[in-house]
Amino acid sequence: MNTSKSDELFSIANKYIPGGVNSPVRAFGAVQGNPVFINKGQGCRIWDVDGNEYIDYVCSWGPLILGHSYPAVVEAIHEAASKGISYGAPCETEVELARLICEAIPSMEMVRMVNSGTEATMSAIRLARAYTGRQLILKFEGCYHGHADSFLIKAGSGMMTTGVPTSPGVPEVLAEKTLVAVYNDISSVEQQFRRYGQDIAAVIIEPVAANMGLVLPEPQFLKELRRITELYGSLLIFDEVITGFRTCFGGFQNLINIRPDLTTLGKIIGGGLPVGAYGGRRDIMQMVSPSGSVYQAGTLSGNPLAMAAGLATLKELKNSDWYDRLEVVTYYLTNKLKPVFEEHDYLFEINQLTSMFTVFFTENAVNSYDHVKTSDTEFYGRFHRALLKRGVYWPPSQFEVCFVSCAHELEDVDITIEAVDEALDEVGQR
Ligand SMILES: *Cc1c(COP(=O)(O)O)cnc(C)c1O
């Protein structure tokens, strides 16, 4: 595979941009070799600057559920741009998108648009703290909620008391305000609540964990979480930045029939442009300025291009059979992957939900962060490179989810399966 232009760009990039990338995982640090620089995307395919073609299972990390350059989305952006790129004043499309979101996710009675998922979660916990008059936040090990200080916290081993920052620069006084519990382990939550319950402003969780690879919630876990938070008067925040409009037209909460107090969104609702949103109960949301006193603002929030892209995406998904189709194509893929790994004698676990899946290189069923960590990441790295050479762009980390888009056809899946088969031949035994 010729990657000379990508390699050259990467060396220049390294001079001007830390690590040569604008978001860490893009650097392929967890796998082998340099990243490839992409300059075109169409449907389920991307092309790099050296002309190599790939079937894409990253899809911009989730936003591109319709695939690259979906005509209706491109057209909506063109049309919006021709009328002005940003006004810093209210526009019609932001009202339309807000209404569509609130209608699709009943627990969201009101919504505020922001520019990223990070902004959404950061604002949601500020609001939760203001509403409850409490300071502590409870999150789960292995769940990602963007890069705000309060979320860059990892638990110590066993039953943690106070959080330890996972990044330098996070003040300890803030880290102490974030408690950590174990995903799918309600007793770890109860333990924290017994001790700190009266001071916990909110529990924030990815209802389906999709930032440690894909880890599904056990049936009673989220229900129990709803019960405990209600009991203690803490807010429940579902971070649906990935799952929103991914698992169905609405949030994952629609499928399991649980009403969180607040929900955060991003990714798909921006159709590939930078967008986030947070919303929920009206009495809580009305505390946000200017209707209330909780300050939160944004120069480009509700940007007309971003709103147009999000609106076009959601309109395409609404009342369509896309979700059924996505599930069929993804199931076809994971089902065909299994015998390929088995034939090569690999120990693996595949977790899948609708159009998301992860192949974990481990022998254990994976339903918590501890299980995730048993995966063979070194092997994953070699597998990733071997696949890339064969035209399949898989996430460059064992802990990132594969996304299937509406543009992936069964034929693309067949090509993928063949590439996986050959890649496994190349990388040999673990
Ligand atoms: C991506 C993601 C975020 C952060 O969104 P950004 O737009 O990258 O800031 C927050 N929460 C979850 C669950 C995410 O997957």
Image (cartoon, rainbow, N blue to C red):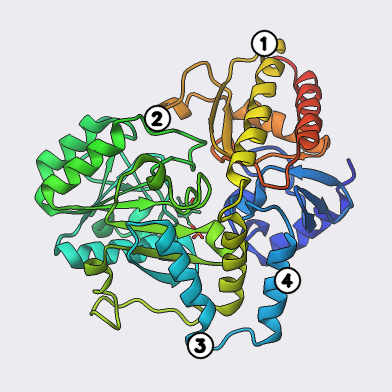
Q: Which residue is mark 3?
A: 88
Gap between marks 2 and 3, in whole Å?
A: 43 Å
Name the residue rendered at 68%, 17% in the picture.
341
Task: Please tell me whether mark 2 or mark 4 is closer to you in this view.
Answer: 4
Tag 4: amino acid: Glu
Label 3 amino acid?
A: Gly
Q: Amino acid at mark 1?
A: Asp
Q: Earlier in the sequence, mark 3 or mark 4?
A: 4
Mark 3: secondary structure = loop
Would you call the spot at circle 1 few (<14 residues within 10 Å), some (14-19), or many (20 or more)?
few
Picture quarter containing residue 349? top right
User: Is 384 placed left or right of 48 in the picture?
Assistant: left
Q: Position of residue 90 (x, y in %)?
A: 47, 86
Left or right: residue 152 versus residue 57 is left
Instruction: Tell me which residue sits at (88%, 40%) in the image.
Output: 1
Give the residue type at disc 2.
Answer: Ser
Residue wearing tag 4:
75
